Image (cartoon, rainbow, N blue to C red):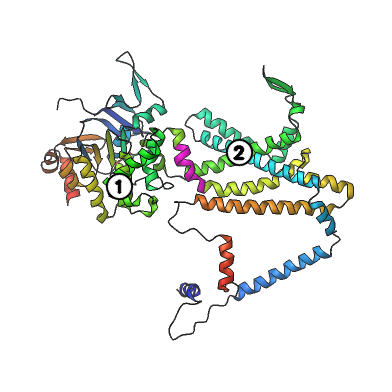
Amino acid sequence: MNTQPLVRVEGLHKSFGPQEVLKGVSMEVHSGEVVCILGPSGSGKSTLLRCINFIEEPTAGLIFVGDEIIGHRRTPDAAVLQQVRESEIARQRQDIGMVFQKFNLFPHMTVLENITHAPRLVKHIAAGPAKATAMDLLEKVGLANRAGAYPRQLSGGQQQRVAIARALAMEPKLVLFDEPTSALDPELVGDVLEVMKDLATGGLTMIVVTHEIGFAREVADRVIFVDDGVIVEQGTPAEVLDTPSHERTKAFLSRVLS
Amino acid sequence: MTRDSAATVDNMTTDAAKPGYRVIPVRHWGRLAAGIVTVALLASIVVSFARAEIDWSVVGQYFTYHTILTGFMVTIVLTVVAMVIGILLGVLVAVMRLSSNPVVSGIAWLYVWIFRGTPVYLQLLLWFNIALIFPHVGIPGVFSGRTVDLVTPFVAAILGLGLNQGAYTSEVVRAGILSVDEGQGEAAKALGLPSGALMRTVILPQAMRVILPPIGNETIGMLKTTSLASAIGASEVLNESQHIYLVNNMIMELLLVSAIWYLIAVSILSIIQYYIERRFAKGGSSKALPLTPWQKIVWFFTTRRSLA
Ligand SMILES: Nc1ncnc2c1ncn2[C@@H]1O[C@H](COP(=O)(O)OP(=O)(O)OP(=O)(O)O)[C@@H](O)[C@H]1O
Ligand SMILES: [Mg+2]
């Protein structure tokens, strides 16, 4: 691929106090690509995702998404970057959707309001068009009949599909998924993965932290294996999942596949 | 085990069909006895009030006396204005305290420390006598004046009560904000909401369920605390009652007039509080909303089994 990558992470470090969680991560994701991140618990996968949209501020390193350098602005001097304030970071985040393990729907809003809230408030889209877009998205995730429900009235799988629709309503260039099916009962996982497969087929750029090896094998263009704050290896699903070259990858896979 | 089954029977008795059996409901002898004792005590108190040398016609006569009515209005206005100031300040200070800027959160902490740490009565006296420290106030070029002219008893009462309330409310609001799951803020951030909109449309509405019950209580408390303003001569209802009984010596009668007005206002506030809380319970729980008091009364008299 010679084209400019959509996402470029360069030398990312993140520490919480004395504990260094990310120890220099660099990676690229091209437009339309689906990248699955695998790794043991505590290896820093969530932290990596949360640094990409600056919910967690990196200790060192840069995140390029499209033309933006998250948290920074270019200056006339190419060697100098200006840090930007929180309101500017909020604007940069509009292009980066995120889907959480625990859904995090707004409980005081209906399904429809959850989806239209940010487009109306942040992008100043009028009520009518915002609702039309939301209904299209609900149709896509198979929940058009639940628009008026409150999140608590929905099953976990339904809530997660609403959360996906909510992220898509901002028309992001990139969507980050942090273990989107880990909090779900096994019989509900399939519906959510199905929606994500459709999105992948539709050309959405996705970075997915997951323990669903089957999904990674079937949908991912590339799999990245992270352990102890570094990328241990990456490649096509076949390369990483079937013929891993590192001992740590082999050990991890034998644990999750057994 | 036996307790459990007893409770189950108790919950199901009344009309539950149990083919072939006559079911004897549990008798609550303790409740019945307590009810009788309470009613007897109440009756004796009512009787002693009725027999005492209280001229109830005076109570009736002064109940709608014009200075009493204006005094009551002042009480209401003081309560409303002090609470509005208190809530606005409270939200502001709560957000300041949660700020990552140590100067901002430090100032907020200092404010709470001072205003929550001293008696509100003392604060009222301080504001009333503020001219001793700042004889003149003003904004250069806009206006200026003598503090004594500006800080009337009413203004001193508003300042004292409002600033004190702000300190308490900020703690309530802070607890409410902290009660909202962190994931909510993260989800709103990830959608690109700026911090102001995030606080206003995502965090605070959810914090309301925690914030409102104590705010309701504090509004009721404030209604009564305004009576302290009589000490600095603010003409609220208790102060007006005192003015009258210092002249006609009908002390108990006029105190009762004030008491009745307070009870009326508190009752109305309690009802308002109840329905506001119900409204904000929306979406917060999968359980059905509890019965309103009216529905409870209807339930009590239609099922006839709560006393015995
Ligand atoms: N806000 C925080 N403050 C302090 N430590 C944190 C914080 N967030 C994460 N950590 C620590 O960073 C390490 C990596 O956490 P992270 O959540 O990124 O792991 P993960 O790979 O997503 O694990 P899992 O598969 O369990 O979700 C853990 O040791 C965790 O305790
Ligand atoms: Mg994680």
- Amino acid type at mark 2: Ala
Indicate whether B283 appears above or below B74.
Answer: below
Q: Position of residue A66 (x, y in %)?
A: 27, 27
Q: Which residue lies at the image location 42% right of the left edge and 45% below the top edge?
A: B181
Which corner quadrant of the figure contains ligand 1? top left
Residue A182, relative to residue A244: is it above or below?
below
The answer to which of B206 and B289 lies nearer the viewer is B289
Residue at the limit of the structure toward the top, as seen here: A77
Residue lying farthest to the front in this orientation:
A128
Parent chain of label 1: A
- Determine whether label 1 and label 2 are within 8 Å by CB: no
Report the disc number at residue B167: 2
Q: Which residue is the site of mark 1?
A: A161
Region of the chain picked out in magenta, as a range: B198-209
What is the C-alpha distance between the residues marked 1 and 2? 43 Å
As drawn, is A12 to the left or to the right of B168? left
Q: Please name which of the two marks, 1 or 2, marks the residue nearer to the observer.
A: 1
Residue A226 in sight? yes
- Label 1, secondary structure: give it: helix
Can residue A100 be seen?
A: no
Q: Position of residue B265 (x, y in %)?
A: 68, 51
Q: Nearer the viewer, residue B77 or B156?
A: B77
Helix, strand or loop for disc 2:
helix
Residue B155 horizontal/vertical position (percent): 71, 34
- Check if mark 1 and mark 2 are on a common chain: no
Q: Main secondary structure of the magenta part?
A: helix
Residue at image point 76% right, 46% down: B69
Q: Is residue B199 magenta?
A: yes
Q: Amino acid at mark 1?
A: Arg
